[in-house]
Structure formats: structure tokens, C-alpha cells
Image: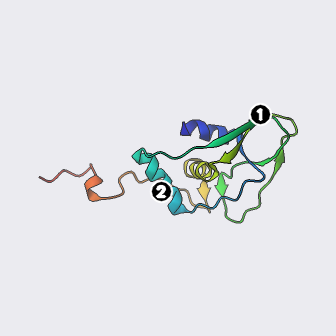
Amino acid sequence: MISNLITQIDNQDIVLPAIQRDFVWKEERITTLFDSIMRGYPLGIVLLWETYLDIKYREFEKDYQPESKYIFKDNSTNKRIKLVLDGQQRLQSLSIALNGSLDGKELYLDVLSGKTADDFSRPLKN
């Protein structure tokens, strides 16, 4: 499911309506999102509106820079787009972490981080 959403974002099939607020999540919040994914916790919903209407939209930022100016587009060719009505922060975070950068930094997952007891590369003590 996540890979399908990211592919659609990369192909500009899923976009953000011009009325959507700015991306505000910081590195710590993105890390928490991925921690939830790794633990199998529910992530909430993503609400998309599929339309062919000529609506102003913007694409997701692959290499997000705070304070960057958005470039808005018109759907004047009436192609099918899916506008994000709810879930922008999560989708933008996934896109940044998996395919981009945040303020010039590439994010990564350290699957062995956490408690020593969670590190299965070490022999268990009896």
C-alpha cells in the first residue's frame, strides 16, 4: 500500500490542492511515523478526491526545504488527478524519507536502534 502511494506521488497522480496547508512535520515526527510502521501500528487514513476538474494544485516536494515557495499548476488538460484532502503530512513524510531529503538531509532507518534487548545480532544472555 505505501509503495503504491509513493509511486502515485512520484508520477504526479496524487497531488496537493492549492488550499492545502504547508508541510510542518519535523525530523522527529517523521521518525515516529516510521517507528509506527515498523511496529505495525495503524497510521490513520488518507483521504483522496479523484477528479478531472481544472483545479489549482501543487506537487509533493521531493527535496523539501522549509520556507520554499510552492509552484502551483492548473489541471487545464483535465487529466485525472487525486487531491489529498487528509493525510498530507504523512504522505509528504513518506515521500521525503523514501525518495528525497528534508532541509538537505537524507533520512534513513536504523533498524537496530533502540534497546540492547532489541538487538538480535548479539548473543542472548541466560
Question: Tag 1: Cα neighbours inside 10 Å, few (<14), some, or many (≥20)?
Answer: some
Q: Nearer the viewer, residue 62 or 24?
A: 24
Label 1: state its secondary structure: loop
Question: Quarter holding the N terminus?
Answer: top right
- Identify which amino acid the numbered label 2 is placed on: Thr
Q: Position of residue 124 (x, y in %)?
A: 18, 51
Question: Tag 2: Cα neighbours inside 10 Å, few (<14), some, or many (≥20)?
Answer: few
The reply, left or right, for residue 24 in relation to residue 29 is right
Give the residue displayed 27% in from the left and 58% down from the top: 116
Label 2: state its secondary structure: helix
Direction left: furthest residue? 126
The disc, 2 or 1, on the residue closer to the chain's N-terminal end is 2
Q: Position of residue 65 (x, y in %)?
A: 67, 62
Q: Which residue is mark 1?
A: 80
- Identify which amino acid the numbered label 1 is placed on: Arg
Give the residue displayed 41% in from the left and 54% down from the top: 110
Q: Is residue 6 visible?
A: yes
Q: Position of residue 27 (x, y in %)?
A: 54, 62
Q: Nearer the viewer, residue 46 or 23?
A: 46
Q: Position of residue 43 (x, y in %)?
A: 51, 47
Q: Which residue is mark 2?
A: 32
| Distance between mark 2 and mark 1 Cα atoms | 33 Å
Direction right: furthest residue? 76
